[in-house]
Image (cartoon, coloured by chain):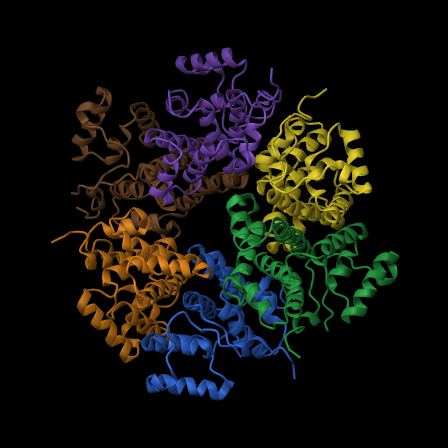
Chain colours: A blue, B orange, C brown, D green, E purple, F yellow
Amino acid sequence: MTDKPISRFPVPALADLPDDIRTRILAVQEKSGFVPNVFLALAHRPAEFRAFFAYHDALMEKESGLSKAEREMIVVATSGANECQYCVVAHGAILRIRAKNPLIADQVAVNYRKADITPRQKAMLDFALKVALEAQRIGEADFEALRSHGFGDEDIWDIGAVASFFALSNRMANLTSMRPNDEFYLLGRVQK
Amino acid sequence: MTDKPISRFPVPALADLPDDIRTRILAVQEKSGFVPNVFLALAHRPAEFRAFFAYHDALMEKESGLSKAEREMIVVATSGANECQYCVVAHGAILRIRAKNPLIADQVAVNYRKADITPRQKAMLDFALKVALEAQRIGEADFEALRSHGFGDEDIWDIGAVASFFALSNRMANLTSMRPNDEFYLLGRVQK
Amino acid sequence: MTDKPISRFPVPALADLPDDIRTRILAVQEKSGFVPNVFLALAHRPAEFRAFFAYHDALMEKESGLSKAEREMIVVATSGANECQYCVVAHGAILRIRAKNPLIADQVAVNYRKADITPRQKAMLDFALKVALEAQRIGEADFEALRSHGFGDEDIWDIGAVASFFALSNRMANLTSMRPNDEFYLLGRVQK
Amino acid sequence: MTDKPISRFPVPALADLPDDIRTRILAVQEKSGFVPNVFLALAHRPAEFRAFFAYHDALMEKESGLSKAEREMIVVATSGANECQYCVVAHGAILRIRAKNPLIADQVAVNYRKADITPRQKAMLDFALKVALEAQRIGEADFEALRSHGFGDEDIWDIGAVASFFALSNRMANLTSMRPNDEFYLLGRVQK
Amino acid sequence: MTDKPISRFPVPALADLPDDIRTRILAVQEKSGFVPNVFLALAHRPAEFRAFFAYHDALMEKESGLSKAEREMIVVATSGANECQYCVVAHGAILRIRAKNPLIADQVAVNYRKADITPRQKAMLDFALKVALEAQRIGEADFEALRSHGFGDEDIWDIGAVASFFALSNRMANLTSMRPNDEFYLLGRVQK
Amino acid sequence: MTDKPISRFPVPALADLPDDIRTRILAVQEKSGFVPNVFLALAHRPAEFRAFFAYHDALMEKESGLSKAEREMIVVATSGANECQYCVVAHGAILRIRAKNPLIADQVAVNYRKADITPRQKAMLDFALKVALEAQRIGEADFEALRSHGFGDEDIWDIGAVASFFALSNRMANLTSMRPNDEFYLLGRVQK
């Protein structure tokens, strides 16, 4: 536990939040055992909070040709490239849990080219990184490379959209100096 | 008018859309005289569409210490840096209209350092570009620079959040090869 | 019209210029209806002015395997990459006029990969951008790519030379903070 | 435990190694409980192995104005910038142990600017990153910045030399695709 | 001496050149003892040749607040940054001769920050490199830095214009794979 | 000869050095006719000195599938990319001598793509530069490219290890502002 600030900006008390936001946060706390700081830091702006999590859920919780672990790989790899401490630490934990693999998050965060992933997943991350870092250069050849690994166009939208959403998320975390909860660092590291 | 595709991905017919999305699109058409292609391209994914425009409106339509024209400057400058054709052309039009200035959008898109804007606005765009291109390096000195121009912390969140949201938006436009409507190119160029 | 300075450096009065330079400028004014600021800003140094425009005309006015519109595409695309406000705005106008296309200049300036141009023209701009940004890496494979689109070696010299000349021109415009004339912004946007 | 290859190159059996190298490796195994893969991967070239570890020890084991934890911070921060999986994972473990801080390594690896370190340590890492990424730009002002935090010239040599040595080490690890031992990932994460 | 090609493009015979160009080349040969390859390679295009050398002479041969050696320093430093073999080798020779210093050219080509030059010359080269590599960021602070070293505005134009002209020249040399004459390598290295 | 400092840090007198280091330095002086400054500058730290030269000799003096001249090409090309004045000047001299070619060092230092070397040597330098500048991206395709030119895996280790060792060396030289001896500039330039 720490008493370091979790955001450069004011962080509202749970009691002061609109009902829908407080309800969502309490549900997360119930499920996870703690409130990830992103909920508290973004609650400073309720309208933006609602849109942010609606977007997040539309991409990360839905059915998709990508497994949930694969979507978290995209988050961790692009957040590593963007040097976003909150997203690497928090989504690294989620990735370890979803992939049931205690090593994968650190590997993907530092250099996904050398991670224990499949060639198909490497192609997925090649594309995601290109969206994250030089989307203006995405062209037909990049789509073809993904199709040759069996990705359909809806999968490609998913890859690109997750990378795009975390382009936003990484920047908000760096803008606010959002601090990852201490709990995330160890989650999923000890296999049971 | 053109018959070029407006997206690499399927574009739904208005008649096939959920009611709320069709209603929103018809309202925009009523107001603008045409349907900006971003509405049609993103309607391919209704849940993402709703979150995208909720986020957009939360940032771009609300009261703020930044004028609406200033927020559009941020969009145009960061979209120029990200080489996003849709956003530069479409938001360039909106910027011309909101600033009542037919020259400003092209100036800001190419090199805001030489645009006809105030030193305060240049500081705003320096910060926005840093969020767009290297948010990981944002630090206390960047906040101080904005404060010295009279920006408060809520204004700084606004600057950073607009740059962050269009980091997402630019990537989606480049991913989908979103085509700006022909109508945008001339809007706001002839002062009445 | 504006009374903003057109250069950081002194701008000579027409009456004070050497005859040949004044004559050239008056001829341009006669033809265009106004004097593009590049003529006035560079006239501060008559010997450099003469060499600059001799070079310009040798490349841009001569017969070539590239159409005049194609040469202007090279100017606009490389000037966009170099963030040269004067050249994007002024040559954007010329490109619209020469291509008889009101949309093309903004498209090429922001991201030529998504512009309404032919694959041959995209290959031309790929090469031009490589000359503009990393000429040291130009090699045989780049020549082969152009030849596969039907360009001959004289055409390749033309592409490279136009990109090289505007490497000079963009830097002089950014050095002098050369201001584009207000007239350029609207030229060629309304088809007759 | 894993049976993935630990190097692209041949890895010698302990029994085949020169005595001095085998002795050193057995001593490490005795102390750590396992043999870090860097010892096995580099033992492919005994003469280079000896020089590598002599250099390592000369920098990392000696008395210095920098604590051992601080020297490991330099390793982790520069290895993160160089995307070296082996060094981030292995030296991240050592940093956690030496700093008695289970969070510090992930923070420093992703973005040291937001880590729980002192301003003096941030200045140290600013300098180390500059040596790692653009040593050609190191100048008197960089030395002055360190001196203003109380670093003496011998300390500055140490900072620069550690960053320089791991410039070598990171490249050898990426060249050989050196795999971090599974044991490193959890070391120092659970405080006792 | 070598029989390697001096350009990717056709190189005209002296006898086939227009009189004015042949005369100029013979004069250079008379003075230098050999014909620098840039004259032969560019003579492939007589109109461009005339403009190129007129521009060159207008900047490099005239009276200026910068000595001729200082102007050659700008050429060598910016050509080094642009990895232009012809210009570094040929103008390195001229710099050695004009500065009467056999070491200066190699120092400036590799890293001018560590060359045996004055602080005023370092400021001059800082500005020249900024024009060469990121002219779009040149601003008032850069002008002030030069003024604080005693440079007047005409000197600043000279610095920027030489850097701009060699931005063109470096690109033409890399485009044509222009080969430096063997004679240049040793010129000015042995002091008499 | 010059009296400029050869390092930012203290330089020991020969008489004050440990015997083994003094002996090594005197042997070099005997052979070369002067003491290269790298020996004096690094002797400030005897333990690091010993490891540095042991590493150097293990790579540069041993039998290898690469000739000694080829290994010096790697040094000069990567040191040029790292803007390391000491290494370009000193190893440029060694390269000229070992290759018996007075032109090769300047060519390789500025732009090896245009140097008088074989396609096999260009492939070697492509790989070496990738290790020097972006080792994290080295992958199977890079190994294949070298194998197609006849390099075996031990040769590839050599290429990568030389590039890695000079990543260290270049940074130490830039950190210490190590000054190349005047003698190096002319060595090997006059063929006998």
For residue C162, side relative to residue F169 (left or right):
left
Picture quarter with the N terminus of chain F: top right
Viewer-side residue, D98 vs A45: D98
Q: Quadrant of residue E49?
A: top left
Q: How many marks?
A: 0
Place of residue E90 in the rendered image (x, y in percent of width and height, measured from the top left): 53, 25
Picture quarter with the C terminus of chain F: top right
The residue located at (37%, 20%) in the rendering is E63
Tell me: residue C113, above or below residue E50: below
Place of residue C27 in the rendered image (x, y in percent of width and height, measured from the top left): 19, 27
Tell me: residue D66, above or below residue F29: below
Q: Quadrant of residue F102?
A: top right
Viewer-side residue, F1 vs F33: F1
For residue C111, side relative to residue C131 (left or right):
left
Q: Is residue C112 visible?
A: yes
For residue A184, side relative to residue F59 (left or right):
left
The residue located at (17%, 56%) in the rendering is B100
The residue located at (34%, 71%) in the rendering is B52
Place of residue F65 in the rendered image (x, y in percent of width and height, measured from the top left): 77, 42
Tell me: residue A186, above or below residue F118: below
Place of residue C110 in the rendered image (x, y in percent of width and height, measured from the top left): 35, 51
For residue C31, side relative to residue A86 (left or right):
left
